[in-house]
Image (cartoon, grey):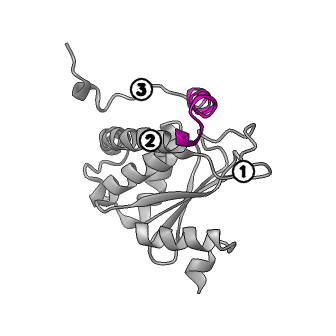
Amino acid sequence: MESASDNATTPLIFGATAIHTLRRAMEQRIGGETATILQEAGYASGNELYDHFTAWLPTRTGVVDPGDLDVEKVAEVLSSYLREAGWGTVELENIGESVVVLTSSDWAEADATLDATHPSCFFSTGMLTAFMSRISDAAIAAMEVDCRSQQNHERCTFLLGAHETLQAVYNAIFEGRDYRSVFTS
């Protein structure tokens, strides 16, 4: 009999429709706790996603340890992996010296029919926090600043960086400034 740890690198098919349905059901039944619960579940999923990534990595790149990836190829490898894992097509770019911007016009968790008033890919935020922390071997936080679940938004944009940096971004947004202003001032 297999244990749960034996299945750590076997992907479990849990599609976008399931995430959308789960979020809607939770919002109807428990309301305000939905974001926190989905982020916690996403965080647990991010650790499992990392395990799957480390099994996938040598088959696609010949590199066993993510820390050994050529810095010039990290964005390409992560983009390929997230696309193949079903999360969507992503672009990664650096902004400032300490933040990576991940954007996607087809991110799986986003629900364009939601017409949310704020970024709503809560599961993904938790997942990316754990996944990127494991890849970088450092504490990384994720913050969604733009979401296809919002009316008239064409893409999801996640910032990945140190908690302190993303807190400054959050403060800027709260003050009505664009998140990029943190990196240009």
Q: Which residue is mark 2?
A: 42
At x 23%, y 26%, the residue is 6
Q: Is residue 51 magenta?
A: no
At x 56%, y 26%, the residue is 18
Compared to 28, does 1 lie above or below? above
Residue extending farthest to the top is 1
- Identity of the amino acid at label 1? Thr
Q: Measure the C-alpha gap from mark 3 to mark 1.
A: 31 Å
| Disc ID at residue 12 | 3
Quarter of the image that includes the C terminus: bottom right
Q: Which residue is mark 1?
A: 117
**Residue 81 falls in which quadrant of the image?**
top left
Residue extending farthest to the right is 152
The 10 Å Cα crowd at callout 2, few under 14, some 14 to 19, many 20 or more, is many
Q: Nearer the viewer, residue 24 or 149?
A: 24
> Which numbered disc, 3 or 1, marks the residue closer to the eye?
1
At x 54%, y 45%, the residue is 122
Q: Earlier in the sequence, mark 3 or mark 1?
A: 3
- Identity of the amino acid at label 3? Leu
